Image: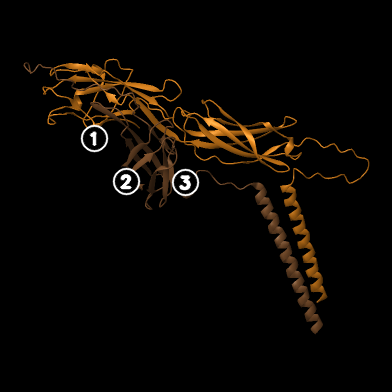
Chain colours: A brown, B orange
Amino acid sequence: MGNSNKLISAIILAVLSLNLAATLGVNAPYWQGNPLKMYPGETREVFFSLVNGVNEPTTEASVSLTKGDDIAEVIGENKYTVNPGENEGGVILGISIPNTAEIGDNYTVGFKVSYIPSGGEGNVKLNVGYDVDFPIEVVSQEDASSTLDVPSTISKSIIYITIAIIVIVLLIGIIILFLKRRNNERKIDAVK
Amino acid sequence: MNKRKKRGNKYLVMVVILAVVLAFLVLVLVFKEDISFSPSQPTGVKINVGNAIPTIVDLQPIPNVNLNPSPSTTSVTVTFTARDSNGASDLVDETALAEFTNAGEQTRTGTCSVQSQTQKEKTYQCAVLMDYFDKSGGWAVNVKVNDTKLVSATSSSTFIVNLLRDISLSSAIINFPSAAPGDFNIISTEQTVITNNGNFEAPPGAIIVTSYDLVGEVDSIQNIPAANFKAAGASQADVCGQGDSLIHSSPKPIATSSLSRGPTGNTETLSYCLTSVPDISSQTYSAIGGNAWVIAIN
């Protein structure tokens, strides 16, 4: 080693990059402490939004499942192009809870989002990754998470008006029946 | 036969009366705010129409909110319908507002404008701006509008803010000064500043570095093992002594690093140390392409 004391020219060459390495994020509807609740035998798709800043370049991301491949799969492409300002769609996971699962069972599903940032040259390049893990609780069908983003609601007025219409229709029906019956009786009386 | 007829008529009368009463009750329920019963004696009575209390008859559910990363805000739309039996014009549009609350979080408030109007109802649409660091989980939404007598109609509901993981690195490259075989404890010339652009929080150890051996750019058989590097967060000044040793191709939690959310204090700085230079040839060594190191968060 002694004679080879010549400097190793730039073990790692310094090249500064002014670019930010990360331009992409992930919005998740479920996380530790906010589990997805599904019932035995249920299958559903869960959406995770890939988001890019408005001032950032278009970025390509790759997605791979890291946990729970016995019940989950990435639907569609594993590579995504996320445009500046985009914050919709993205990763879709298909999740199927086995029929044999029991209420109270727990699963963990996870996937990794990673990408190669734009710009910068040097000896150690840094990429960014997000480990998106979330728990799944097996519950009864009544307790399962809504498959909709928002619960649907019916206003009280609509219910009342519907009842009123039903009552009126019933009333008309009864009157028609009665008139028919009376006509029949009259005919019978006339025959007699 | 006449007896049967009479009985039938009786039933019909009873059914009709019942149905009429039912229909009347339902209509009273629907239009209860608008029905007032006149006095039975039409004598010289002065009728003073009082102020009817306005109500919120509909507050549209809010879908899960996907926040935009820093520096953007996210506009969340709230739609509600208010009713005033004195007439829709009795509602004061300037007082209509929507606010989001969550314990320990800054209240987010938005103003509203009239989207549509009927004789006694107004539908308002409000835009509430949320910040990238607003807490994930359940938020309460409260809406309100006053009438001309300053009587308020209020309603509330809840919605979910999704968890946004979004970090930026400055810079994307780690640099070291030139060194010779046998040198030790060489600190990187650049640190990595990680900025949290979302609402997640990384507790100590939740920032993970996956490293790879640095390979010779001329003679790729020679390398500097990833195990010769250490990394530490800003709270650990002695990265060469107390930093976490990295492992080739394995995620290594950096125990002394963490990341808060918020408009300030939302950064962490990683520093690196090459603890020893092995006996290797003079050339440039790098970890790029498939060997690029990965900064990850859970």
Q: Position of residue A36 (x, y in %)?
A: 43, 42
* Residue A71 in the image: above or below residue B203: below
Name the kind of residue labelled 1 in the image.
Answer: Gly
Callouts 1 and 2 on one subunit:
no
- Element at label 1: helix
Q: Nearer the viewer, residue B127 or A73?
A: B127
- Chain under disc 3: A
Q: Would residue A13 be found to the left or right of residue A179 on screen?
A: left
Single out the mark in the foreground, 3 or 2: 2
Contact (Cβ within 8 Å) of mark 3 with mark 2: no
Q: Name the chain letter of the residue that bears numbered label 2.
A: A
Number of numbered tags placed on the structure image: 3
**Figure quadrant of the C terminus of chain B:** top left
Residue type at the position of mark 2: Asp
Picture residue at 56% right of the left edge, 47% below the top: A152
Q: Nearer the viewer, residue B205 or B71?
A: B71
**Residue A138 appearing in the image:** no
User: Would residue A1 appear left or right of A79 to someone viewing this image?
Assistant: left
Considering depth in this image, is A72 or A182 the residue closer to the camera? A72
Instruction: Residue A55: tell me if it is visible.
Output: yes
Amino acid bearing label 3: Ala
Residue B230, percent from left and from top: 24, 22
Which residue has dot 2 on it? A69
Residue receiving disc 3: A144
Circle 1 sits on which residue?
B290
Residue in view at x 67 percent, y 48 percent? A157
> Residue B227 or B7: which is nearer the viewer?
B227
Disc 3, SS? loop
